[in-house]
Image (cartoon, helix red, strand yellow):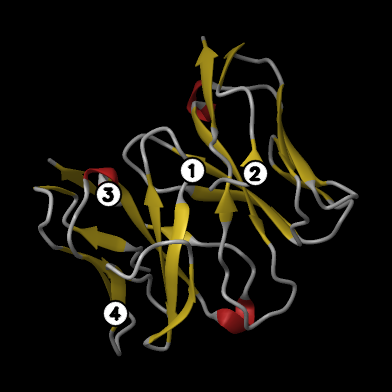
Amino acid sequence: ETGVTQSPTHLIKTRGQQVTLRCSSQSGHNTVSWYQQALGQGPQFIFQYYREEENGRGNFPPRFSGLQFPNYSSELNVNALELDDSALYLCASSPGLAENTGELFFGEGSRLTVL
Amino acid sequence: GQQLNQSPQSMFIQEGEDVSMNCTSSSIFNTWLWYKQDPGEGPVLLIALYKAGELTSNGRLTAQFGITRKDSFLNISASIPSDVGIYFCAGIRSTFTGANSKLTFGKGITLSVRP
């Protein structure tokens, strides 16, 4: 069973740039969610994708957008980067909405630094 | 912002001791979960609680879902060095399957275990 994988693991960008982070969900999982974890904080929900459609969004501006592909992998895009966007971005997959147990399987994250 | 309260920020215990962590909220959550995050990793689920008053064990871990649905505790007995890490409580508001599994996380408690 392949776990959740994310790329890249680390990246540095400057203010105003755009970034794309990628995530492959665990085998058999069709739901992917993204979380932002600032230093010293708990993860904060950005949004969730189920069957290629956004299914719930947290308190993040529209410059945070995402995609889910037919193979259930996902991308997180952030436009017009700000210094406060520096954080660990976690992708998590789960088996599906019908089996909503709250158990999420997290990847190791992509650490974004905005200078 | 964060709606689950965890304190203190850090705890230091001796190997072999028991430790208890609390998580409180001003809002009702219908599912409570406890996750652990090791350095450089994503959070991993330890215990999930689905019913008010429920007491659940997983090896040396025991957790309870408060009767008011506004709190939960996690107890670790006979701590060992590999218990070191950050412990997060998380809650889900929705009560029905098919809803997104948006998790609200606390800020986490960093546990250190002295040999």
Question: To which residue does mark 3 refer?
Answer: A85
Marks 3 and 2 share the same chain = no
Query: N-terminal of the two: label 1 or label 4?
Result: 1
Which residue is at 27% across, 67% downward?
A63
Residue type for callout 4: Leu
Q: Position of residue A89 (x, y in %)?
A: 32, 53
Q: Secondary structure at mark 3?
A: helix
Q: Chain of mark 3?
A: A
Query: N-terminal of the two: label 4 or label 3?
Result: 4
Asked if residue A42 is positioned above or below residue B39 in the image, the reply reads: below
> Separation of disc 3 and disc 1 at Cα?
15 Å
Marks 3 and 1 share the same chain = yes
> Separation of disc 4 and disc 2 at Cα?
29 Å
Q: Chain of mark 2?
A: B
Residue type for callout 1: Gly
Question: To which residue does mark 4 refer?
Answer: A67
